[in-house]
Amino acid sequence: MAVKANYETVMIISLKQGEEGIQAIIEKFKALIEKHATLQNVDEWGKRRLAYLINKESEGYYVLMNFESEAAFPAELDRVFKITDGVIRSMIIKKGE
């Protein structure tokens, strides 16, 4: 049986997507995580000011998700983050025991 670990991911979604677009992206990633892992928590931090401009944007919509998965899944999740329009930054961290 494969060993599972706890992870957390933060993604910043472009406000140019609009409210419906932002919710669609959040639902897309919730479904992806639930398909391949155990989603533990979704915390929408909402609209926040960015520390520096990213693609000429000064604000973004932050979402934190905690999940438990096998070691191969975070790489696939990161790949999908990078090819999804509207996600301007993302980070996945393996949580310590």
Image (tube, rainbow, N blue to C red):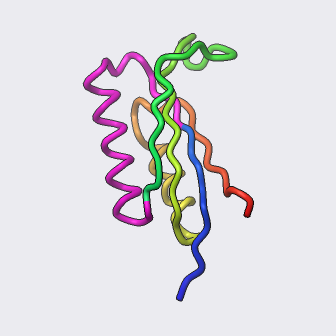
Residue 1 pos. (x, y %) = 53, 89
Q: Residue at x 62, y 16 (%)?
A: 50
Q: Please state the extent of the stretch shown in magenta in the rendering.
A: 11-38
Q: Magenta segment: does it hold 25?
A: yes
- Residue that lies at the very extreme toward the bottom in this rendered image: 1
Residue 90 pos. (x, y %) = 57, 39
- Residue that lies at the very extreme toward the left in this rendered image: 20
Q: Residue at x 48, y 36 (%)?
A: 43
Residues 63 and 50: in front is: 63
Q: Magenta segment: does it hold 80?
A: no
- Residue that lies at the very extreme toward the right in this rendered image: 96
Q: Is residue 7 above or below residue 86?
A: below
Instruction: Write down the quadrant of residue 23 in the picture.
Output: top left
Q: How many marks?
A: 0
Q: Quadrant of the C terminus?
A: bottom right
Q: Residue at x 44, y 63 (%)?
A: 38
Residue 55 pos. (x, y %) = 55, 18
Is 86 situated left or right of 19 in this image? Answer: right
Q: Residue at x 53, y 63 (%)?
A: 68
Q: Main secondary structure of the magenta part?
A: helix
Residue 66 pos. (x, y %) = 53, 50
